[in-house]
Amino acid sequence: MKLVNARILLAEDGLQQAQDAANNETKSSAGDKYETGRAMMHLEKEKLAEQLSAALKMKKVLDQIRIDAKLEKVGLGSLVITTNANYFLGVSVGKLEVDGSTYFAISPVSPIGQQLMGKQVGDSFSFAGKQVVLEQVF
């Protein structure tokens, strides 16, 4: 959640800076330079708006997770310990280090997330040419 909130703040700040820059831009006698600058600012604002939208979607998914729920099968919000790696099924934010252990925060719709969904302790499957066994599900 901290990573997602940081992404939201970064995108919002970038959008505000881009808007401030656009408001302070004055038309110069070099019209082409002015138009190119405005086009570049517009593209930057679009990129930041997309980043903000993606981060807000991530926050919405994380808000749905109930970490106190006891799950027998892997689902949204599960922490899964396997023979190959440790996963948190929520949103894709990549590799996380927590208390000296490595976890991969993945989306349930990612290829490995799809393989994990609905599985329970002791289940196994093949992924990327390796046999994966679920050892613990929280």
Image: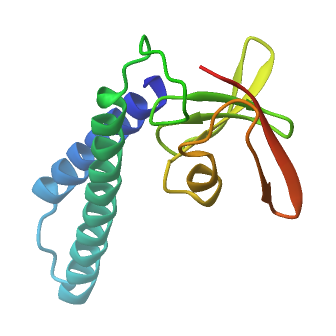
Residue sitting at x 16%, y 59%:
22
- Image coordinates of residue 106 in percent, x first then y, are 57, 44
Along the horizontal axis of the image, is 76 left or right of 61? right
Q: Nearer the viewer, residue 74 or 37?
A: 74
Residue sitting at x 44%, y 36%:
76
Q: Nearer the viewer, residue 122 or 57?
A: 122
- Image coordinates of residue 104 in percent, x first then y, are 67, 38
Along the horizontal axis of the image, is 27 left or right of 112? left
Toward which corner of the image does residue 123 lie, by quadrant? top right
Q: Quadrant of the C terminus?
A: top right
Give the mark count.
Answer: 0
- Image coordinates of residue 125 in percent, x first then y, are 76, 53
- Image coordinates of residue 43 in percent, x first then y, are 29, 71
Q: Which residue in the rendered view is the most extreme toward the bottom?
A: 32
Residue sitting at x 47%, y 15%:
70
* Placement of 107 over or under 13, stated as above or below: below
Along the horizontal axis of the image, is 40 left or right of 69? left
Toward which corner of the image does residue 100 lie, by quadrant? top right
* Placement of 97 over or under 51, stated as above or below: above
Residue sitting at x 41%, y 38%:
7
Q: Nearer the viewer, residue 66 or 70?
A: 70
